[in-house]
Amino acid sequence: MATTKKTETKAAEKKTAAKTAAKTATKAAEKKTATKAAEKKTATKAAEKKTTAAKKAPAKKTAAKKAAPAKKTTTKKAAASKVDVFVEFGGVQVSIDEVVKNVKKTNGKAAKELTVYLKPEESKAYFVADGEEKEMDVFFC
């Protein structure tokens, strides 16, 4: 009887050990499967991000092209609002645009930098064109 119990106990322990090993192996297999599934999901997400990024990149270029005409429209509005400036002295007025045009003619050559000083009490325009100081008469008519 004692021998039978020992044998039965050993058999039960073996079964328990086998079940535990099977459970451990099953859990390990499940973890591997879960890990592989997670890796596949990560790889799929990475591929989707690359695809999405590739799809979005041309869209950004298109958006930039669309934005450029909008800026041109804004520039056209600014160009459409013309400002006329006049200097009045002794009851007579002179347009600043005319003074600048005449200063450019008087200078004789295109200037990269032009600064104009208008002195109506002397009927003169003093100007600096590319570092050269000059003057001209301004007629208030």
Image (cartoon, rainbow, N blue to C red):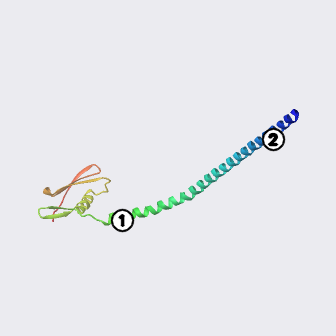
Q: Amino acid at mark 2?
A: Lys
Distance from disc 2 to disc 1, alpha carbons, whole Å, reads: 89 Å
Image position, residue 97 (x, y; %): 25, 62
Which residue lies at the image location 58% right of the left edge and 54% below the top edge? 49
Direction left: furthest residue: 90
Which residue lies at the image location 85% right of the left edge and 35% below the top edge? 5
Q: Secondary structure at mark 2?
A: helix
Dividing the picture into quadrants, the one containing residue 24 is top right
- Disc marking residue 17: none
Dividing the picture into quadrants, the one containing residue 53 is bottom right
Relative side of 111 to 118, left or right: right
Q: Nearer the viewer, residue 137 or 66?
A: 66
Q: Amino acid at mark 1?
A: Lys
Does label 2 or label 1 sit earlier along the sequence? 2
Q: Quadrant of the N terminus?
A: top right
Q: Secondary structure at mark 1?
A: helix
- Disc marking residue 76: 1
Q: Quadrant of the C terminus?
A: bottom left
Q: Nearer the viewer, residue 24 or 128?
A: 24
Image position, residue 35 (x, y; %): 67, 47
Image position, residue 55 (x, y; %): 57, 59
Between circles 2 and 1, the one closer to the viewer is: 2
Direction top: furthest residue: 2
The residue that disc 2 covers is 15
Relative side of 73 to 89, left or right: right
The number of numbered badges drawn on the structure is 2
Image position, residue 47 (x, y; %): 62, 54
* Residue 78, above or below 7: below
